[in-house]
Image (spheres, rainbow, N blue to C red):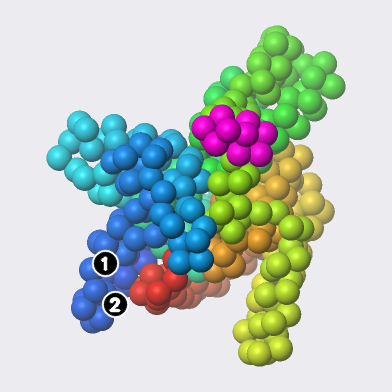
Amino acid sequence: MRDAGPALAVYAAIRLLGIAALFLWAAVADRDAHQLLAERWDALWYVRVVEHGYDFTLTAPDGRVLSDMAFFPLLPWLEEGISAGTPLSPADAGLVVSAVASLAAAWGIHRLVALLYGRRAGVLTVALYAALPVGIVQSMAYSESLFTALAAWSLYAVVRGHWLTAGLLASLAGLTRPVGLAVAAAVWVGAYAALRRGTSETPATPRWRPLTGALIAPLGAAGYVLWVGVREGDPVFGYLDVQGAWGNGFDGGLAFARFIGDLIATTPPAGLALAAGVAGLLWLYGRGVRQGQPAPLLVYCGIVTALALCSSGYFGSKPRLLMPAFPLLIPAALALARARRPVVWTVIGVLAAGSAGYGAFWLHGSGPP
């Protein structure tokens, strides 16, 4: 905690700025900031799981039947447990989970990056993560903060060779979001490399540990997907059918490419900016490869990025889906680490202010984040 203190302080300051901007904007617009954070969009579906179990469906205007089984269970389980033992409602319990998990995510990101590249790079990666344009989601009753915390600490355990911890955290991440299999894949890659070396980081560690961690890692995601499939009467494709009703699927990025093309044709500045943003993400990933990021981080980040960019779901959610791909921020953090301190904190301050303003504007819009 002594080492992580500066990173957590910076993270908390940036996120508090974002929350303050949201509440100020809500007061001017005569809106309820608490409702925006805890009682809209996906947050409502998690509460419905708590209140009804996995038995709630909603018929869309076009006839599609939307099922709450599209939402993984760990967050509603935690909401139910907290609300059962405290006066908090499930929605407020979700805010508590996100608040604690967001700090745990920042701590895990710092520990991982500091281990690989030094404390300064760790603090700056956390600052960039907090100041993402969609960083306000880290403070919502959504599952992104919980997932990122589990993923960051699992990756840290992989790098340290703590295989049982890595596998357990990966399995919990798989109970949080569909992309949890990316964490399991990172554990598999790390375990495979350790076994090929004939040791799991230290000669005293028996070979059964990486094997066991690799076996545990996918159990959460695989178990939930199989359970949904059985409930739907098709163990193989049942979960995909549930996601398909929501418009979610993997098409290799064709739908997103068409969306960008249409946007360029109708609103060139916005379309070109979006295309440049995608190109920037790919450049950052390539930069991470050239800088020699460990293979488990590259595999995890690559899968998260590919699933976010190549899915056919609601395009407005892609920035949120990319948020757990925090290794993309490491090259930028390393570049900032070489700059002078006034330059560093001027950049962070500008990004934090921009994130606060954009987050308040975003949540006051009509569409879900």
The outermost residue toward the right is 196
Is residue 183 toward the left or the right of residue 69 in the image?
right
Q: Nearer the viewer, residue 23 or 118?
A: 23
The image position of residue 98, as x and y in percent, is 37, 47
Considering the numbered disc 1 on the image, is that residue within a helix, a strand or a loop?
A: helix
Residue drawn at x 56%, y 29% is 230
**Where are the magenta residues, as a range?**
228-238
Residue drawn at x 21%, y 78% is 30
Q: Which three-letter amino acid code belongs to the residue tagged 1?
A: Ala
Q: Which mark is residue 33?
A: 1
Q: Which three-letter amino acid code belongs to the residue tagged 2?
A: Trp
Q: Nearer the viewer, residue 341 or 256?
A: 256
Q: Which residue is mark 2?
A: 25
The image position of residue 267, as x and y in percent, is 64, 89
Residues at circles 1 and 2 in contact by the CB criterion of under 8 Å: yes
Considering the numbered disc 2 on the image, is that residue within a helix, a strand or a loop?
A: helix
Name the quadrant of the N terminus. Answer: top left
Q: Is residue 100 above or below residue 364?
A: above
The outermost residue toward the left is 87
Res 3 seen here: no
Is residue 172 toward the left or the right of residue 36 in the image?
right
